[in-house]
Image (spheres, grey):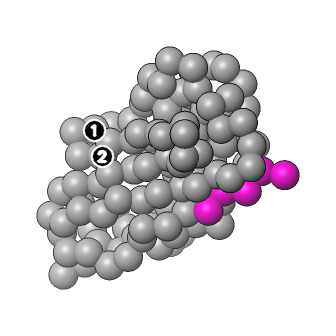
Amino acid sequence: QVQLVESGGGLVQPGGSLRLSCAAPGFTFNYYSMGWFRQAPGKEREGVSCISSGDGSTSYTDSVKGRFTISRDNAKNTVYLQMNSLKPEDTGVYYCAARPGLRRCLLSTLEYEYWGQGTQVTVSS
């Protein structure tokens, strides 16, 4: 069974940085595309960034381009999201998700089969 465990969330001031981690022990990690999603109160869950299996190509939603960086370490079965220049509108619960198959990642929640429990990110002064 695939388990995803996020960590690294917290409270940060505007302009600050956080690095989220998602550990995925016990499965063939490099066979999965990985995505980060977030959900603010009263809003739908949205795709933030993803990284493909195979070639490691990445995708970002427009609002985080140039500020967030996704990466993966296949040896550690871990995907990261480095978040810089954080804004209050980045506040939400951040979820890690896994999509099996050697194919390009997508930012649609419908494409992902496994989900973590989420980690809270709050950007506030």
Q: Residue at x 73, y 56 (%)?
A: 3
Q: Position of residue 12 (x, y in %)?
A: 26, 75
For image coordinates 42% across by 68% down, the residue present is: 8
Instruction: Tell me which corner region of the image, top left, top right, bottom left or bottom right, holds residue 110.
Output: top right
Q: Is residue 17 left or right of residue 70?
A: left
Question: Does residue 87 appear to the left or right of 108 in the view shown?
Answer: left
Seen as rendered, the residue at the extreme front is 75
List the residue tagged with mark 1: 65
Three-letter residue code for mark 2: Phe
Query: Image quadrant of residue 32?
Result: top right
Q: Residue at the left extreme?
A: 15
Identify the element where label 2 is drawn.
strand
Q: Is residue 119 visible?
A: yes
Kindly report which numbered mark, 1 or 2, lies closer to the viewer in this rendering.
2
Secondary element at tag 1: loop
Residue 22 location (% of width, % of height): 54, 55
Residue appearing at x 45%, y 23% in the figure: 57
Kind of residue at disc 1: Lys
Q: Is residue 2 magenta?
A: yes
Q: Which residue is mark 2?
A: 68
Q: Main secondary structure of the magenta part?
A: loop
In the depicted structure, whether residue 116 falls above or below residue 124: above
The magenta span reads 1-5
- Mark 1 Cα-neighbour bin, 10 Å: few <14, some 14–19, many ≥20: few
Is disc 1 in contact with disc 2, using a CB cutoff of under 8 Å? yes
Residue at 22% across, 39% down: 66
Rendering coords of residue 105 (x, y %): 56, 28
Foreground: 124 or 1?
Answer: 1
